[in-house]
Every structure is written in C-alpha cells, then in structure tokens.
C-alpha cells in the first residue's frame, strides 16, 4: 500500500470507530486525541481493526507511533508495503 492508501485506510477505520467526527479537516501532524474525541478504548479499536483487516501486529510499546496520521502512516508504511 502507498502512503496515500494507508491514510485512506486509517480514515476509513476512524469513520467506523468515531462515526460522528468530521474527518475531512483532519490535521495529519496533530494527535488524534487532540482532534477527535477518542478514548483509550477507541484507540485500541484502531489497533484491533488493523490487525483484523491486515493481520498487522502492533506491540503495545509501539502504540505511541500511532499518535497522529503522519506518524501512523510512517509507522505502517513498511509493514503494509506488500499489501
């Protein structure tokens, strides 16, 4: 997957987890928690959805790499390169 495709996938996951949020003006550099009303369970749902959809294992000590859209895409790009 390209970085743009990964971003689209994350937007799709966020739209399922937080259906009432406006994701059209998401700032890729700002943390998800600052922009969206996500709690820790929502964040775990993102991790679980990535695991379910793409079989990507994200160790708990690496969850901080998923703080913003840009850091998430950067973290996932090598893991999803062949998808």
Image (cartoon, grey):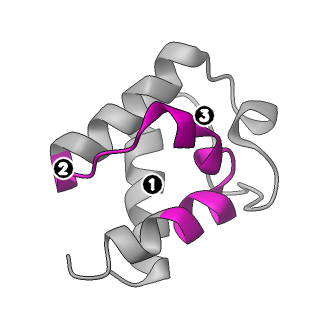
Question: As rendered, which of 8 and 65 lies closer to the eye?
Answer: 65
Cα–Cα gap, marks 2 and 1: 11 Å
Cα–Cα gap, marks 2 and 3: 22 Å
CB under 8 Å between callouts 3 and 1?
no
Q: Is residue 78 left or right of residue 38?
A: left
Near mark 2 (Cα within 10 A), the count class, few <14, some 14-19 or many ≥20, is few
- Circle 1: element type: helix
Q: Which mark is residue 10?
A: 1
Q: Which residues are magenta?
A: 53-75
At x 30%, y 46%, the residue is: 50
- Circle 3: element type: loop
CB under 8 Å between callouts 2 and 3?
no
Labels 2 and 1: the sequence-earlier one: 1
Front: mark 2 or 3: 2
Residue 2 in the image: x percent, y percent?
40, 84
Near mark 1 (Cα within 10 A), the count class, few <14, some 14-19 or many ≥20, is some
Near mark 3 (Cα within 10 A), the count class, few <14, some 14-19 or many ≥20, is some
- Circle 2: element type: helix
Q: Which residue is mark 3?
A: 21
Residue 77 to residue 50: above or below: below
Q: Which mark is residue 34?
A: none
Q: Which mark is residue 53?
A: 2
At x 76%, y 44%, the residue is: 31
Q: Is residue 22 magenta?
A: no
Residue 68 in the image: x percent, y percent?
69, 51
Labels 3 and 1: the sequence-earlier one: 1
Residue 83 in the image: x percent, y percent?
20, 76
Q: Is residue 82 left or right of residue 58?
A: left
């Amino acid at each position: 997957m390209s970085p743009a495709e990964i971003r689209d996938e994350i937007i799709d996951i966020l739209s399922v987890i937080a259906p009432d949020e406006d994701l059209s003006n998401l700032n890729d550099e700002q943390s998800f928690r600052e922009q969206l009303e996500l709690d820790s369970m929502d964040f775990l749902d993102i991790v679980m959805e990535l695991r379910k959809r793409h079989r990507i294992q994200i160790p708990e000590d690496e969850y901080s790499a998923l703080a913003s859209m840009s850091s998430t895409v950067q973290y996932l790009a090598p893991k999803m390169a062949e998808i």
